[in-house]
Image (tube, grey):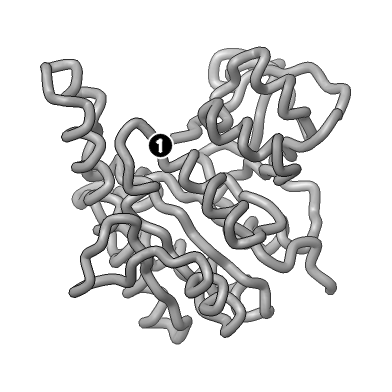
C-alpha cells in the first residue's frame, strides 16, 4: 500500500515511557520502538519529539517558587534521557537512529542541525529530537511543530492515551462521541488541549495536519501512515463542532 504520509513527526509524551516501577520503563520503551520500527521498515521517514514529564514536572516546582527558566531547562534534560532510551531500544532491534539535541552535549548526542537531520532521514535513520527548542517557556508540543515544519514532515502524529478528540470527556459522559476531523481555528477558539496554542498556530500557518490517536493500540502508527481513519485529524475547515480531547501532554 502506498503510504499517505512519506515523512512523519511523532510526538511522544513523557508518560509513554513511564512504567509501574520505573520512570523510564524498559518494556514500554521497547513497545514504542517496535511500533516505530514497523513504519520505518516500510521506507517512511520517521522523526520523533519526546517529552520529559515521566521524569520532571516543572510546574509543580514553579508553584513552590522555583525559577521558571531553571525548571524548564531541567525538563529539557529529562527529554534527553528519554531520547537516549528510545534510541537504544530502536538500535537493539536493528533500526539505525540519531539523537539530536537543542542544547549541545556532544559526548552523548549530535547538536540539532536541520540539514543533518534531513540527511539522516533520507538515509533511513530515525531522528529523535531532545532538549525541546533549547529555550525556556516553549513546550515540547511547540518543538514538535517547529521541527516538523523544518524537516518538511507531511504530518504530526500526536500519540495520546485516548483515541482522539471527543464532544465531552468520555470517562464522564458515556454519550460522548469522537470527531474524525476538526479545523485548527475550531480547536483554538474553544481552547482544546490538542497542542498548546503556539504549536497549533504554527501548524495552521504552515498547513501541517495533526493526527491525534491512541498509542496504546498496536499498529496504530502504521494505520495512520497508511491513511486509515484513526483518531482525529486536525486540519483546515472541517465544519465540525469542537469538544473534548484527552491527555495531550
For label 1, the residue is 139
- Residue drawn at the location 46% of the way across and 62% of the way down: 32
Q: Nearer the viewer, residue 51 or 149?
A: 149
Q: List x then y, in percent, for residue 104.
A: 25, 62
Whether residue 27 is visible, yes or no, is no
Position of 142 compared to 8: left or right?
Answer: left
Q: Nearer the viewer, residue 216 or 11?
A: 11
- Residue drawn at the location 73% of the way across and 20% of the way down: 186
Among the 4 quarters of the image, the one containing residue 245: top right
Among the 4 quarters of the image, the one containing residue 82: bottom left
Q: List x then y, in percent, for residue 152.
A: 66, 60
Q: Is residue 21 above or below residue 62?
A: below
Q: Secondary structure at mark 1?
A: loop
Q: Nearer the viewer, residue 42 or 97?
A: 97
Q: Residues within 10 Å of mark 1 (few under 14, many from 20)?
A: many
Number of labels in the image equals 1
Q: Is residue 4 above or below residue 91?
A: above
Position of 171 compared to 96: left or right?
Answer: right
Q: List x then y, in percent, for residue 92.
A: 36, 82
Where does the N terminus fall, quadrant-wise? bottom right
Where does the C terminus fall, quadrant-wise? top left
Q: Is residue 42 above or below residue 245?
A: below
- Residue drawn at the location 65% of the way across and 20% of the way down: 188
Whether residue 173 is visible, yes or no, is yes
Q: List x then y, in percent, for residue 59.
A: 25, 24
Among the 4 quarters of the image, the one containing residue 3: bottom right
Position of 173 compared to 154: left or right?
Answer: left
Residue that sits furthest to the left in the current view: 65
- Residue drawn at the location 22% of the way across and 26% of the way down: 68
Amino acid at each position: 500500500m502506498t503510504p499517505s504520509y512519506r515523512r512523519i513527526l511523532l510526538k511522544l509524551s513523557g508518560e509513554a515511557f513511564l512504567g509501574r516501577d520505573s520512570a523510564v520503563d524498559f518494556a514500554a520503551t521497547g513497545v514504542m520502538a517496535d511500533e516505530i520500527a514497523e513504519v520505518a521498515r516500510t521506507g517512511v521517514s520517521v522523526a520523533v519529539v519526546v517529552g520529559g514529564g515521566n521524569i520532571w514536572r516543572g510546574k509543580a516546582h514553579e508553584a513552590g517558587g522555583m525559577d521558571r527558566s531553571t525548571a524548564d531547562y531541567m525538563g529539557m534534560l529529562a527529554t534527553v534521557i528519554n531520547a537516549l532510551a528510545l534510541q537504544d531500544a530502536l538500535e537493539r532491534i536493528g533500526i539505525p537512529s540519531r539523537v539530536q539535541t537543542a542544547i549541545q552535549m556532544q559526548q552523548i548526542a549530535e547538536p540539532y542541525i536541520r540539514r543533518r537531520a534531513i540527511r539522516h532521514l533520507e538515509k533511513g535513520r530515525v531522528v529523535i529530537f531532545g532538549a525541546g527548542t533549547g529555550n525556556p517557556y516553549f513546550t515540547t508540543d511547540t518543538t514538535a511543530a517547529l521541527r516538523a515544519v523544518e524537516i518538511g514532515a507531511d504530518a504530526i502524529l500526536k500519540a495520546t492515551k485516548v483515541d482522539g478528540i471527543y464532544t465531552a470527556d468520555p470517562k464522564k459522559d458515556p454519550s460522548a462521541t469522537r470527531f474524525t476531523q476538526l479545523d485548527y481555528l475550531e480547536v483554538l477558539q474553544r481552547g482544546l488541549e490538542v497542542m498548546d496554542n503556539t504549536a497549533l498556530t504554527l501548524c495552521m500557518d504552515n498547513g501541517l495536519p495533526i493526527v491525534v490517536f491512541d498509542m496504546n493500540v498496536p499498529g496504530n502508527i502504521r494505520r495512520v501512515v497508511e491513511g486509515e481513519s484513526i483518531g482525529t485529524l486536525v486540519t483546515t475547515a472541517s465544519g465540525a463542532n469542537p469538544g473534548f480531547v484527552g491527555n495531550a501532554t
